[in-house]
Image: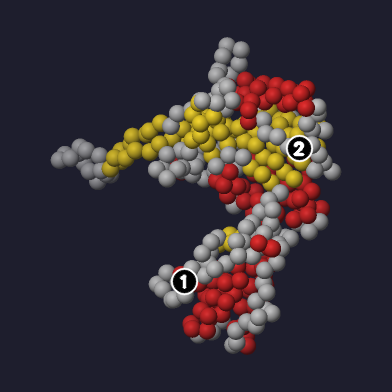
């Protein structure tokens, strides 16, 4: 099995605001002296791991990322008939194994049941937590020190195996990500535009007031994005406890997600859902490298080609040039191209899995 599989993806998004900055505007990046639209890797990974594709393909093998595990434990204990005070104390003891508790005192927001940072729980850990809570409720007594040893390296959570996890207070149980995801950038110069809009009151008959009931402004942008994903297939298999079948299912779900799932930002306002227009996959044991430098010079439509055609040409030329200079940078490659109708997604999936 080739260790690395690298995906070079071109996806065109119409006017959208898939990933906002702190001012509500689409995120950007300066590259090659030109401003580009940007979608963060965090935004993409969140969309993929919470997608219907992951849910259906990896049911039972997806982790839970939360600060509120203590609240859930407390609620389960209360439902089992445990009084609030012991239920709260036992829930704090259990949740505290996964991170420092946010507060020592009970509050209206139950901050004493929250951990300070998000923790990613594997299915095995969730099952152990639920079993311990049930045992405590049944005997009406708190957890023992041995029972509180709930942390373990998750081997059944495909999303944790792919994207990793960090537990600052318990680094021995960290998981190194087997899938690296770059921030997506437009292959061309892009601008953030502003949309001025108004809303009309349906009960306003216009006799005394013809004005809008609400006016506002939102930002958007459009572009052809380059997305780079690198899969360390050996590490993924190791993270999944050597389970070949689950490793294959995880890779298949990931390829389907990265080619078909869009980030969720402002989708109701823009319906900016898109499938990838072009995907190039490279396999081999060689050191991975991105092809982002294909677009240091922003792509501009010309008489000899449209934006997508020229972007594909730039990618393929850069791959060939890397091979000429460094020797073969991969053992094999496969591509699908919606513009020309070449290749199939099923064949692409099998190429990455095999």
Residue in the image at 25% along x and 39% along y? 212
Q: Is residue 11 visible?
A: yes
Residue in the image at 62% along x and 51% along y? 49
Percent of width and height locating residue 128: 67, 72
Q: Nearer the viewer, residue 310 or 172?
A: 172
Mark 2 touches mark 1? (CB < 8 Å): no
- Snapshot quadrant of residue 147: bottom right
| Image height of 175 relative to 83, above or below | above
Outermost residue to the top: 303
| Image height of 252 relative to 65, above or below | above
Crowding near the residue tagged with mark 2, few <14, some 14–19, many ≥20 C-alpha atoms within 10 Å: few
* Distance between mark 2 and mark 1 Cα atoms: 46 Å
Percent of width and height locating residue 233: 77, 46
Question: For this view, does 216 lie left or right of residue 28?
Answer: left
Percent of width and height locating residue 339: 65, 24
Q: Nearer the viewer, residue 101 or 205?
A: 101
| Image height of 240 relative to 141, above or below | above
Question: For this view, does 265 lie left or right of residue 210?
Answer: right
Outermost residue to the left: 208
Residue in the image at 46% along x and 32% along y? 221
- Numbered badge on residue 103: 1
- Numbered badge on residue 2: none
- Numbered badge on residue 287: 2
Percent of width and height locating residue 276: 63, 34
Give the mark nearest the N terminus, 2 or 1: 1
**Is the C terminus in the top left, top right, bottom left or bottom right quadrant?**
top right
- Snapshot quadrant of residue 351: top right
Q: Is mark 2 on a helix, strand or loop?
A: loop
């Amino acid at each position: 099995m080739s260790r690395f599989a690298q995906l070079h993806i071109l996806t065109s998004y119409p006017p959208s605001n898939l990933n906002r900055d702190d001012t509500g505007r689409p995120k950007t990046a300066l590259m090659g002296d030109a401003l580009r639209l940007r979608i963060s890797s965090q935004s993409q990974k969140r969309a993929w791991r919470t997608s219907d594709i992951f849910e259906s393909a990896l049911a039972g093998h997806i982790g839970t990322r939360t600060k509120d595990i203590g609240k859930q434990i407390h609620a389960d204990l209360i439902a089992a008939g445990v009084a609030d005070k012991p239920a709260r104390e036992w829930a704090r003891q259990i949740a505290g194994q996964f991170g420092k508790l946010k507060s020592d005192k009970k509050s209206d927001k139950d901050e004493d049941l929250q951990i300070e940072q998000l923790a990613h729980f594997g299915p095995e850990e969730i099952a152990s937590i639920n079993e311990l809570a049930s045992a405590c409720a049944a005997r009406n007594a708190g957890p023992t020190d041995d029972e509180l040893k709930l942390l373990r390296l998750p081997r059944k959570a495909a999303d944790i195996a792919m994207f990793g996890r960090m537990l600052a207070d318990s680094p021995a149980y960290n998981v190194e990500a087997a899938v690296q995801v770059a921030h997506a950038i437009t292959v061309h110069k892009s601008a953030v535009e502003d949309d001025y809009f108004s809303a009309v009151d349906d009960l306003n008959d216009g006799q005394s007031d013809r004005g809008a009931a609400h006016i506002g402004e939102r930002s958007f942008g459009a572009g052809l994005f380059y997305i780079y994903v690198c899969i360390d297939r050996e590490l993924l298999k190791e993270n999944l406890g050597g389970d070949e079948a689950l490793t294959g299912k995880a890779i298949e779900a990931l390829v389907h997600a990265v080619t078909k799932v869009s980030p969720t930002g402002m989708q109701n306002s823009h319906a900016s859902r898109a499938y990838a227009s072009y995907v190039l996959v490279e396999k081999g044991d060689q050191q991975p490298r991105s092809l982002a430098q294909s677009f240091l010079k922003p792509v501009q439509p010309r008489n000899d080609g449209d934006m997508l055609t020229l972007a594909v040409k730039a990618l393929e030329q850069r791959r060939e040039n890397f091979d000429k200079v460094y020797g073969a940078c991969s053992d094999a490659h496969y591509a699908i191209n919606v513009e020309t109708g070449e290749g199939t997604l099923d064949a692409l999936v099998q190429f990455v899995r095999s």
